[in-house]
Each structure stands twice: as C-alpha cells, then as structure tokens.
C-alpha cells in the first residue's frame, strides 16, 4: 500500500513538472531571418507578449545591477538552461544534463577567461546604458557583446542583448555568428562554439575554414582545461567530416587547427589517431581540390611526440622518414624524440643511423642525443660502440658530461672490462669541467669485481672515501660483493658495520653478499647471525 501511494505521488509530480515546463517553453517564439522568409534564426529570440516589454526591461535592468554588485554570480537556474535550449531550438528529448554544466563559473579557468569575464560585464553595462540614452549602436558593436555573452554562457544576458538589438532594429547576420565563434575561441568554450556552428549551418550561412578552425581550437582548449578526451575527439571528427561537407570548395582549414588536435593527442598518448590523421592529411593534399592543408614541421613533430610518449618507436621512426621525404629539415629536438624512443627499445643501430643522418643534413646533435645512444649501447652490452660514440662526441665538438662517462662505465661493468673502466675513469678525471660522482666509482668497482681484480676494487673504494663523496647503499653493496668474491670476510663485516655507523640502511642485497662473504670464508656461525638479523630486518 505504501509503495502504491509513493508511485501516485511521483506521477503527480511528473505531471506538474510537465505543465510548468510547457508554460516556460511557450512563453517564447522565433522570428524569421530578414534574409529569407523560410530561414529560421536560432539566435533571434523575441518575447511573445508585447504588453510585458516594459516589465521585462525593468527585470533585466534589475538583474544586471544585482550581477554587477556581486562578483560571484549565482549559478544558472533551470529556467536559464531552458532559455539556452530554446535559443538553439532544442526539443526536450535533445536536452542533455552534461551540456548544462559546461564552462561554469566555479571551474578551473585560464587568465584569458577572467579577462573576457571582466570585459563582458563592462561591455554589457555600456551597451544597456547607450541604448537607454537613445544612442545608435552599430552591428559590429552588438555582435561583439553578443559573442561575449555566448562565450561565457550568460544566457540571460543573451536575451538582454537581443532585446537591445531589437530596439535598435539590428538583426543577427553572419557577423553575429563570427563574433560568437571568436569569443568562444578566446575563452576556450568548445561546447558553445559547436552550438554556434550548428546554428550557423542551419541558418544556411556556410562556415569558412577560419570558422571551423575557431571551433576546433576552442574544443581543444576546453579538452585541455577539463582533461576530457571527448572534446578533442569531436574536434577531430569535425576536421575529418564536417569541414568537407560545408567548407567552400578549394579552401582548407589552417594547419594550426590540426596542430591543436595533435597537441591533445600527445597528452593522451593516442598515437593511432595521430598516425591516422597525418596519413589523411598526406593523402588529402594530393586531391583536387585539396581536402587538408600541407602538414608543417610542427605537425610531424607532434605526431612523433605522441608516438614517442606511447613508446611506439617504429611509428615515430616512420613519421620522421615522412618528414625527410616531404622536404623540410627536422630539428635536433625532432631527431632526439625518435632516438629516445629507439633507445628505450635498445635499437641502438637504428639510432646510430639517425645520428649519421643528422650529420649529413647538418643538424647538430646535442649531448643528450649522444647520451641516449651511448646508454642504449651500454644496456645492450655493446662496449665498443659506446666507446666509439664517446670519441665521436669530442670529434664533432660536443663536450661529454658525467652522464656520458657513466654510461660507458656501465657498459664496462656489464662486460667485465676492468681495464677499460679504469681508462674511462681516468679520462673522466682529466676532462675539464667534469668530476666523477658516486655512480662513476661504483661502476668502476663493479667492473673490477667482475674482472676478478678485488684489490683494485678496494683501492677505488678507498680513493672514493678520500674524496669525501657521499657514499650510498649501492657503493657499499658493490665493495662488499668484491670482498665476498675475494674471500675477505673480515673486511666485508667491517664495511657492513661502517655502513650502519654512517646511518646507511643495508638492504636485502647487501645482507646477501655479506652472508656470501662469510660463507666463502667458512664462517657459518657469522652467516647464521646475519641471516637472523635479516629476518628481523
């Protein structure tokens, strides 16, 4: 019985809401455009009841004064949202909740948005005052104020501006749509820009490529600000479809709009869409008339950056080859992006090929570019290739840094080439402006340990202590490992105690090599004590 009563109450509430909604909707009606009697203007809204004009103006003026006194404007009411929908001739089924909260006052906005918000209040106040004083207003002036109202989602103010335009006998023209798109572009209101574009097309005003570009960039700005992928995806769809349908024949959207979409793809690491877009642009340029602009060097760089961020080395490499085939010379940073992606995949040979290509194209490689390839060679166990690159750096006039030497020392340690490690360490000492750090000495110790030169490893550790460098867990673990393999269990335990005195916490690997040292020295009791200490660690 209780459930039946609740159901009845819900039906009554729904019925009352529908009645209230119908009264609000039927309070407004649309007037035809002056261009043609059959074309409807989705912006032009007038009040149906002429007898209430004075009361409406009085309410609008009062509302304006209240907004100017209160810097934190009140949130839009349900009636305001319905007015917005009625301006664009939305049916109740087309109204969607997520389209009501776009660009709200409480959101995260850029500095340009605050400038537009302040400018909007000043322009609206000035417009109403001029109209009240009987001054004549121009079409461009009214269009600019209307654009600011739309861009900031001030739909009550849109009605106010339209009332002023009606008093001035000014109608919405193509310039009105353009002014709204420009304002939406400046403040990054992609949703309102899309609404304007749809209204523009419905009114049979054919948008030009600049109009499409403004909408696309506005959507990308909104996507970056709210971290929503759906807006740049809608911008991508607009570039690929609607542009072709409505843009004047032979004209294309500026390449900057494509770059704005690609910059959003970099953040989301959407490399598939990025590759698909650049391939469509390459094919569209060859058509007659062209469907897409010629990709710029910045366009290719963004595609490469997206592929590199997604760890797609092969796609980044192919995009770089496309740049070279198209003609423009890639920058050092563009090459570095691809080399970094190849180095992560340990494709050091292809990275070397790109380095040679940079020399042929007279593109100067940075020290980071060399370090990336050296690191890839070191991780692949290619010591000779890493050493040759270190010599090539000096030959090409690029000064190696500590990371260059440490990468080669890592390769020496991995290959058990202790002599080469000592040679590189000595070169690091003699290099002007470069001082070996704790990583350099640790790798040299590891190289000597793996090469069976335990006394040399101890000598390097002692010189490390003399240089007053801050020791860490890795350095102690490396030297204790040398003591373990050299059957110097007493020295290993001394180093372990010294490590604790210096307030350096041993880890499981450190205890493991110390237990091994005691085991190799036949000190099983010590090994058990360390093992018990590890259990309480």
Image (tube, rainbow, N blue to C red):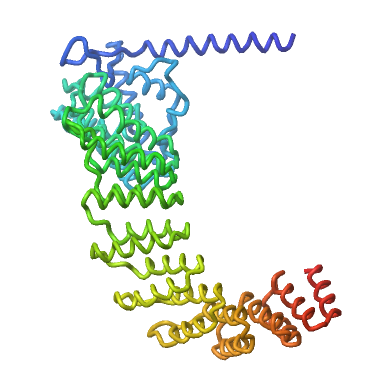
> Where does the image place residue 146, in percent across and percent down from the top left?
25, 30
Quadrant of residue 467 in the image?
bottom right
**Which residue: 46% across, 29% down?**
98
Lateral position of residue 164 relative to residue 94, left or right: left
**Which residue: 62% across, 81% down?**
449
Whether residue 68 is visible here, answered yes or no, is no
Lateral position of residue 525 relative to residue 507, left or right: right
Give the number of callouts. 0
Lateral position of residue 262 relative to residue 166, left or right: right
Whether residue 530 is visible here, answered yes or no, is yes
> Where does the image place residue 362, in percent across and percent down from the top left?
23, 65
Looking at the rendered image, the quarter that the C terminus falls into is bottom right
> Where does the image place residue 239, in percent across and percent down from the top left?
30, 33
**Which residue: 81% across, 72% down?**
531
Closer to the camera in the image, 251 or 449: 449
Looking at the rendered image, the quarter that the N terminus falls into is top right
Closer to the camera in the image, 53 or 189: 189
- Relative to 49, does residue 312 appear above or below in the rendering? below
> Where does the image place residue 354, in percent across and percent down from the top left?
33, 60
Quadrant of residue 249 in the image?
top left
- Relative to 253, does residue 459 appear above or below in the rendering? below
- Relative to 373, does residue 313 appear above or below in the rendering? above
Closer to the camera in the image, 179 or 376: 376
Quadrant of residue 119 in the image?
top left
């Amino acid at each position: 019985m209780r459930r039946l009563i609740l159901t009845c109450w819900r039906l009554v509430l729904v019925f009352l809401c529908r009645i209230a909604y119908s009264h609000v909707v039927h309070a407004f009606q649309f007037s035809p455009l002056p261009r043609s009697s059959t074309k409807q203007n989705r912006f032009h809204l007038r009040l149906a009841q002429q007898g209430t004009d004075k009361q409406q103006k009085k309410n609008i003026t009062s509302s304006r004064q209240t907004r100017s006194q209160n810097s934190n404007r009140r949130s839009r009411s349900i009636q305001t949202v319905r007015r917005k929908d009625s301006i664009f001739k939305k049916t109740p089924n087309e109204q969607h909740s997520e389209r009501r909260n776009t660009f709200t006052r409480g959101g995260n906005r850029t500095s340009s948005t605050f400038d537009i918000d302040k400018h909007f209040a000043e322009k609206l106040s000035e417009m109403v005052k001029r109209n009240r004083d009987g001054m004549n207003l121009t079409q461009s002036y009214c269009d600019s104020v209307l654009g600011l109202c739309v861009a900031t989602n001030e739909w009550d103010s849109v009605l106010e501006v339209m009332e002023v335009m009606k008093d001035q006998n000014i109608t919405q023209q193509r310039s009105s749509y353009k002014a709204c798109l420009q304002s939406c572009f400046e403040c990054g209101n992609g949703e309102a820009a899309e609404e304007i574009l749809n209204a523009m097309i419905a009114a049979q005003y054919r948008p030009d490529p600049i109009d499409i570009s403004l909408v696309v960039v506005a959507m990308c700005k909104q996507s970056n600000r709210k971290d929503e992928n759906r807006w740049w995806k809608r911008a991508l769809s607009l570039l690929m479809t609607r542009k072709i349908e409505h843009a004047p024949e032979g004209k294309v959207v500026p390449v900057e709009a494509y770059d704005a979409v690609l910059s959003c793809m970099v953040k989301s690491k959407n490399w598939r869409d990025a590759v698909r877009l650049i391939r469509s642009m390459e094919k569209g340029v060859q058509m007659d008339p062209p469907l897409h602009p010629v990709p710029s060097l910045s366009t290719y760089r963004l595609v490469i950056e997206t592929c590199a961020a997604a760890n797609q080395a092969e796609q980044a490499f192919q995009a770089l080859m496309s740049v070279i085939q198209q003609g423009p010379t890639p920058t050092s940073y563009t090459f570095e992006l691809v080399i970094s992606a190849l180095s992560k995949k340990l494709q050091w040979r292809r990275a070397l090929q790109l380095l040679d290509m940079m020399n042929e194209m007279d593109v100067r490689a940075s020290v980071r570019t060399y370090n990336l390839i050296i690191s890839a060679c070191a991780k692949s166990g290619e010591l000779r290739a890493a050493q040759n690159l270190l010599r090539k750096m000096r030959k090409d006039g690029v000064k190696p840094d500590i990371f260059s030497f440490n990468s080669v020392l890592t390769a020496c340690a991995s290959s058990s080439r202790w002599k080469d490690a000592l040679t590189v360490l000595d070169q690091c000492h003699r290099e002007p402006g470069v001082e070996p750090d704790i990583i350099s000495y640790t790798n040299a110790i590891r190289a000597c340990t793996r090469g069976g030169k335990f006394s040399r490893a101890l000598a390097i550790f002692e010189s490390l202590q003399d240089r007053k460098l801050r020791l860490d867990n890795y350095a102690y673990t490396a030297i204790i490992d040398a003591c373990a393999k050299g059957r110097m269990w007493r020295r290993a335990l001394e180093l372990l105690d010294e490590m604790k005195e210096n307030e350096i916490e041993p880890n499981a690997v450190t205890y493991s090599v110390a237990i091994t040292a005691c085991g190799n020295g036949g000190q099983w009791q010590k090994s058990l004590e360390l093992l018990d200490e590890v259990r309480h660690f």
